[in-house]
Image (cartoon, rainbow, N blue to C red):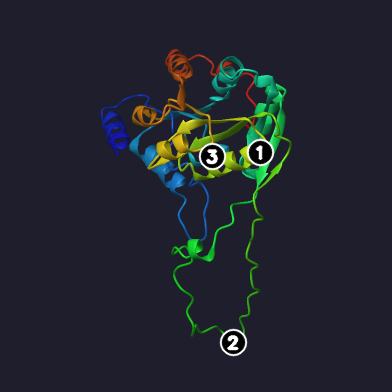
Amino acid sequence: MELLIMAYALKTSCARNIIGVIPYFPYSKQSKMRKRGSIVCKLLASMLAKAGLTHIITMDLHQKEIQGFFSFPVDNLRASPFLLQYIQEEIPNYRNAVIVAKSPDAAKRAQSYAERLRLGLAVIHGEAQCTELDMDDGRHSPPMVKNATVHPGLELPLMMAKEKPPITVVGDVGGRIAIIVDDIIDDVESFVAAAEILKERGAYKIYVMATHGILSAEAPRLIEESSVDEVVVTNTVPHEVQKLQCPKIKTVDISLILSEAIRRIHNGESMAYLFRNITVDD
């Protein structure tokens, strides 16, 4: 709201260009309709355009297609060069590492990292099996109506419920360093579960790397108590408090690329230099 108010104040003051620098674009995970929900990302794009913004600089959108929601230019910068540099300079014996995708959805990003570092790739598939008691948490509400009236001529086919198999690791991680890559770390339960599975499969050191470290709620405590050796995130989101609670959290500074993007836009220079050697899957 503060951003919208400031942008509208600049618009009504006849500013020629209003450029928003939003390193972590909020609600970026809500970029598609789930059941009968709303596409919040599209709503936010419309609000920013209505408030008067003419350009946005952001970093590692959850889905690249989000740029299509906007009616003005969006520069989606990438943090992968900084994270790749961290792997090469700060992880001892990184040549013995394997890049891990914690779900098939993250496989393309992991593959991009693995190809540029000339490392192996592993994918974690499935989900932790929970008991019936754990599943009874209201996710299936509202309850089924017993006496629901259906039109006599309307017989819709029954949808088969999707079931994921137990967690399995596709790829060899035995005796290797496992580096889990993703774009956002918020609730860390899935990362902790992935780390436990990788430990069982023989990985002797586990790193988690992501662009945006939201690390909400009990995330620092869960990381500290888990098998994860280090969590590496960029400073797109402030997380000084979380670092005090958990020394395993490390920060990579990406202010250099943001400041260079601002300078180039201000001087009317090309932005192509900031996207060199960047793949579509980053």
Q: Look at the image and tell me whether residue 215 can be seen.
A: no
- Mark 2: few/some/many CA within 10 Å (<14, 14-19, 20+): few
Point out the tag, 3 or 2, that comes first from the N-terminus: 3
Tell me which corner region of the image, top left, top right, bottom left or bottom right, holds residue 92. Answer: top right
Indicate which label's residue lies in the foreground, 3 or 2. 2
Q: Residue 210 carries which label?
A: none
Horizontal arrangement in the rendering, residue 27 relative to residue 190 (left or right): left
Q: What element carries label 3?
A: helix
To which residue does mark 1 refer? 107
First in sequence, mark 2 or 1: give its number: 1
The location of residue 278, given as percent across then percent down, is 63, 23
Numbered disc in front, either 2 or 1 = 1
Question: What's the residue type where badge 3 is placed?
Answer: Gly
What is the number of the mark on residue 68?
3
Secondary structure under badge 2?
loop
Label ID, residue 152: 2
Question: In the visual, does 238 lie left or right of 124?
Answer: left
